[in-house]
Image (cartoon, rainbow, N blue to C red):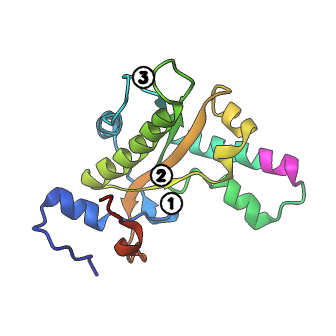
Amino acid sequence: MAPTFGHQMNETLDLLARRRSLPPLGLAAPGPDAAELATLLKLAARVPDHGKLAPWRFVVIEGRARERLGHMALEIKLAASPGLEEAARQTELTRFSRAPLVIAVVSRAAPHVKIPEWEQVLSAGAVCMNLIVAARAMGFAATWLTEWCAYDAQFREGLGLAAHEKIAGFLHVGRATFAPDDRVRPDMDAIVSRFE
């Protein structure tokens, strides 16, 4: 059931009201074509960015690269746990090939004479959210994940990140194969206060 709000809805508000993540297994081909991907990335990059630093960047993972990245994830896991069970091996092998497109949003936040690093980190988070909303507006579905890979130094290096860079999220994009039920949302009375 769609959420209800006490305001006249329009296309943008309706999109935000219905936004829901799908697991990557629920995202099927075709993904965005080259022109759609270019538009998606341009829209994702239109976020608040104090100082115009662009303290983030994108790594596009599609086609066979998704499988290569899964092999890299498995190799790292096996080095730490050689006795990894077959189901866990398959999870790693297919980690990036479940959706037709994965975009790593990389935070390049760093100390700056004027711009707090925290604001740069928040800007990368805004990029992730813009990407999700833009994908949905273009007729795709998307989900924002991190999981262990985002926090593993060897994996980040293998993906081509510099030592100071972090993964803000892996955005999995594709066509929705089902309409997910909504989940429980926060009680607004519990999270809204007023300074008087």
Q: Give the left or right position of residue 180, taking residue 117 as reference.
A: left
Q: Residues within 10 Å of mark 1 (few under 14, many from 20)?
A: many
Q: Would you say residue 99 is visible in this rendering? A: yes
The three-letter amino acid code for the residue at tag 3 is: Leu
Picture coordinates of residue 186, whole percent (x, y): 41, 72
Q: Would you say residue 179 is visible in this rendering? A: no
Cα distance in 3D space between marks 1 and 3: 31 Å
To which residue does mark 1 refer?
Answer: 24
Question: Above or below — where is 73 with respect to 50?
Answer: below
Q: Nearer the viewer, residue 44 or 141?
A: 44
Q: Secondary structure at mark 1?
A: helix
Marks 1,3: beta carbons within 8 A: no
The three-letter amino acid code for the residue at tag 1 is: Pro
To which residue does mark 3 refer?
Answer: 53
Q: Give the left or right position of residue 36, taking residue 68 as reference.
A: left
Q: Magenta residues?
A: 76-81
